[in-house]
Image (cartoon, grey):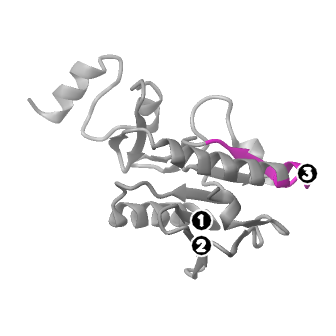
Amino acid sequence: MDRSQLFRDMFPDVKTSQLLTAQDVERISLPGKVTELIRGQLVVREPPGTWHGVIAANLTYYLSDFGRRHELGIVLAQDTGFKIGSDPDTVRAPDVAFVTRERVGGIPTRGYAQMAPDLLAEILSPDDRPGEVLAKVADWLGAGTKLVWLLDPERREARVYRQDGSLSVLLDEDALGGEDVLPGFSCPLAQVFS
């Protein structure tokens, strides 16, 4: 049985072709799974572990508190989808995302925002493959994300990727900074990992 037929059997309401669209993915329901669409290909993963959720919640709290107090924008929760590519479609879902106040109007009430967040965090899971993680970072930066924080709980460090191609490595005793996306934001990495 070819892949298209298998997909039609599993999801009869969804139009099938070799490549799926963002609209197709909106209609797919896989309880307990995390999905992304990468250049038209559906990627299904197990949900992240509990500690991953703790770190995402910590970072969401610090970013949201700062962003709200200073009216800089909004924070979006773990696995919120953003359509960052078309023909074929790509829908990525970061662990934590921030969109500046000026761009919030581009977030629809249904479907995926057709934009990249201004800042986002991805939290490494034990089974993440380095090549896939770097491809995800490249997708975000290529779509317009200005600042990507890649948090590594096992090593208790963060890699900060910027649109200009620069990279910084922060250790547990260092602080994540909002740079020009969230001016004045600073959060000790140790607090995010605790």
The span shown in magenta is 66-77
Asked whether the beta carbons under mark 2 and mark 1 sit within 8 Å of each other, the answer is: yes
The quarter of the rendered structure image containing the N terminus is top left
Residue 69 sits inside the magenta stretch: yes
Q: Is residue 82 visible?
A: no
Identified at 40% across, 26% down, the residue is: 28
Determine the CA span between mark 3 and mark 1: 22 Å
Give the residue at mark 1: 149
Determine the residue located farthest toward the front in the rendered image. Answer: 194
x, y percentage for residue 191? Answer: 70, 60
Amino acid type at circle 3 is: Arg
Give the residue at mark 2: 160
Q: Is residue 81 visible?
A: yes
Determine the CA span between mark 2 and mark 3: 24 Å
Q: Which mark is residue 5?
A: none
Amino acid type at circle 2 is: Val
Total tally of numbered discs in the picture: 3
Query: 10 Å neighbourhood of mark 1: few (<14), some, or many (≥20)?
Result: many
Identified at 36% across, 66% down, the residue is: 130
Give the residue at mark 3: 69
Identified at 77% across, 43% down, the residue is: 105
